[in-house]
């Protein structure tokens, strides 16, 4: 019985010492020391006073250009710092467009966030979604008035339903070029 109690007390003592040792271990929280970093080395420090240097191989400054892709952006270029940019500008467009974000290609491509790491000069492109309405006006050149069509972007209309009347004339159809009568259209998509 004494051996059993002795073993249990030794085990309890070992567990308590291990627990004490674990609580004394320090976990480093590294903070970027910008003042003491340079072009070749990033310096980090911890609250405990320990310092760590990290060699920089590919950290350089690059130029990121912003193409508003039909809109307007106040900041057209930004220089990276440690391969990143602090904030992406927000472009403007007419009220008929909603900005979807910055992308690597004018159409398609990958969406870019502020977490992006740049390794070369780059151009980013604004992507937009049309949210407004469009108005299609008819020029009947002396024929009866046809009321304009106002509809959402992307709607299709059968123009054969919109026929003006003019005494002594037969209507032959709508054209996108009034001078040459080229490009006759029967269906029209508002875009």
Image (cartoon, rainbow, N blue to C red):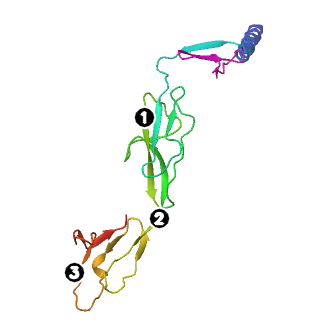
User: How far apart are labels 3 and 1 at the CA level?
Assistant: 52 Å
* Relative image position of residue 10 (x, y in whole percent): 74, 9
Magenta stretch bounds? 25-48
Question: Alpha-carbon neighbours of circle 1 within 10 Å: few (<14), some, or many (≥20)?
Answer: few
For the N terminus, give its image quadrant: top right
- Where is mark 3, residue-wise? 172
Q: Check residue 27 for magenta coloring.
A: yes
Question: Alpha-carbon neighbours of circle 3 within 10 Å: few (<14), some, or many (≥20)?
Answer: few
Mark 3 vs mark 1, foreground winner is 3
Q: Earlier in the sequence, mark 3 or mark 1?
A: 1
Which of the 4 image quadrants contains residue 49?
top right
Mark 3 vs mark 2, foreground winner is 3
- Where is mark 2, residue-wise? 132
Q: What element carries label 3?
A: loop
- Looking at the picture, does residue 109 appear above or below residue 148? above
The answer to whether residue 134 is left or right of residue 185 is right
User: How far apart are labels 3 and 2 at the CA level?
Assistant: 32 Å
**Which disc number belongs to residue 122?**
1
Q: Is mark 2 on a helix, strand or loop?
A: loop
- Looking at the picture, does residue 10 appear above or below residue 188? above
């Amino acid at each position: 019985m004494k051996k059993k109690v002795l073993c249990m007390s030794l085990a309890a003592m070992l567990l308590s010492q291990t627990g004490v040792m674990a609580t004394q271990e320090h976990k480093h929280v590294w903070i970027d020391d910008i003042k003491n970093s340079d072009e070749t080395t990033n310096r980090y420090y911890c609250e405990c006073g320990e310092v760590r240097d990290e060699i920089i191989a590919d950290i350089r400054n690059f130029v990121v250009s912003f193409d508003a892709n039909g809109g307007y952006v106040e900041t057209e270029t930004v220089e990276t710092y440690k391969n990143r940019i602090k904030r992406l500008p927000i472009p403007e467009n007419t009220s008929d467009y909603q900005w979807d974000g910055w992308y690597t290609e004018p159409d398609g491509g990958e969406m870019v966030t502020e977490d992006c790491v740049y390794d070369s000069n780059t151009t980013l492109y604004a992507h937009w979604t049309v949210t407004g309405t469009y108005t299609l006006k008819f020029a009947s050149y002396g024929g009866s008035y046809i009321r304009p069509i106002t509809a959402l972007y992307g709607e299709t209309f059968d123009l054969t339903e919109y026929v003006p009347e003019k005494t002594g004339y037969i209507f032959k159809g709508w054209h996108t070029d009034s001078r040459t009568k080229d490009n006759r259209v029967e269906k029209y998509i508002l875009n």
